[in-house]
Amino acid sequence: MKSVGVTKQSWLLRGLALAGVLVVVRIVMGALVEASPEHGTAVRMVGLLIVVGVSATWGFVDGKRDRRNHPDPDHGGTDLVMMWMFAAIVAGLSAGLVCWILGKLGLNMGDNSLFFELVSGASWSLLLVLVGALAGKVLGAKTAQRSLPEIHHVSPSSTAAER
């Protein structure tokens, strides 16, 4: 399968933007849980849905655009899985580091250690971003595929009479 290379700007932009989403969600969650601890579970679920929703929406747009530009996935296209993997790694590690710094500066971000934020916290964030983006990518590609003409593959072993 021939793939178009993934540029550093594409995954870095996605990773840093989603790190920003993760940090904002954590700040808002911290403030809301501090103000109303009895609603902590609901607040965390809404935060989870926001992060997954943003990454799924972006993945959907990427998947749809890639399938429109490359209708046959076996002959071209961007390697969106690797792009989103790199973006998720950047998002998880960046958000973990920023949240740890903000926690040290006095914001209610929990009292997690730097090690926890860069291992467990980053892993969870990476998983949320990656699963959301890849689910969105698949749905976007399927949506775009419906509007494209069907591609008929000719095997190399077929004869001219069979074609």
Image (spheres, rainbow, N blue to C red):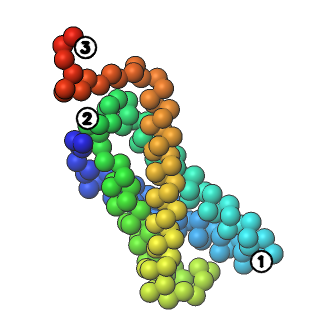
Crowd band around label 1 with a 10 angstrom C-alpha radius: few (<14), some (14–19), many (20+):
few
Q: Amino acid at mark 3?
A: Arg
Q: Residue at x 37, y 66 (%)?
A: 90
Q: Amino acid at mark 2?
A: His
Residue 98 visible in the current orientation = no
- Seen in the picture, residue 101 relative to 58 is either above or below; the reply is below
Q: Secondary structure at mark 2?
A: strand
Q: Amino acid at mark 1?
A: Pro
Q: Which residue is mark 2?
A: 75
Who is closer to the viewer here, 78 or 40?
78
Q: Which residue is mark 1?
A: 37
Q: Residue at x 50, y 32 (%)?
A: 143
Residue 112 visible in the current orientation = yes
Q: Which residue is mark 3?
A: 163
On the image, which quarter does residue 15 sit in? bottom left
**Which quadrant holds the N terminus?**
top left
Mark 1 or 3: in front is 3
Crowd band around label 3 with a 10 angstrom C-alpha radius: few (<14), some (14–19), many (20+):
few
Q: Residue at x 33, y 55 (%)?
A: 82
Q: Residue at x 54, y 86 (%)?
A: 112
Q: Is residue 16 left or right of residue 153?
A: right
Q: Mark 1 or 3 closer to N-term?
A: 1
- Residue 66 coordinates in the image, percent (x, y): 36, 37
Q: Secondary structure at mark 1?
A: helix
Who is closer to the viewer here, 163 or 150?
163
Crowd band around label 2 with a 10 angstrom C-alpha radius: few (<14), some (14–19), many (20+):
few
Residue at the top extreme of this rendering: 161
Mark 2 or 3: in front is 3
Q: Mark 2 or 3 closer to N-term?
A: 2
**Which quadrant holds the C terminus?**
top left
Who is closer to the viewer here, 25 or 49?
49
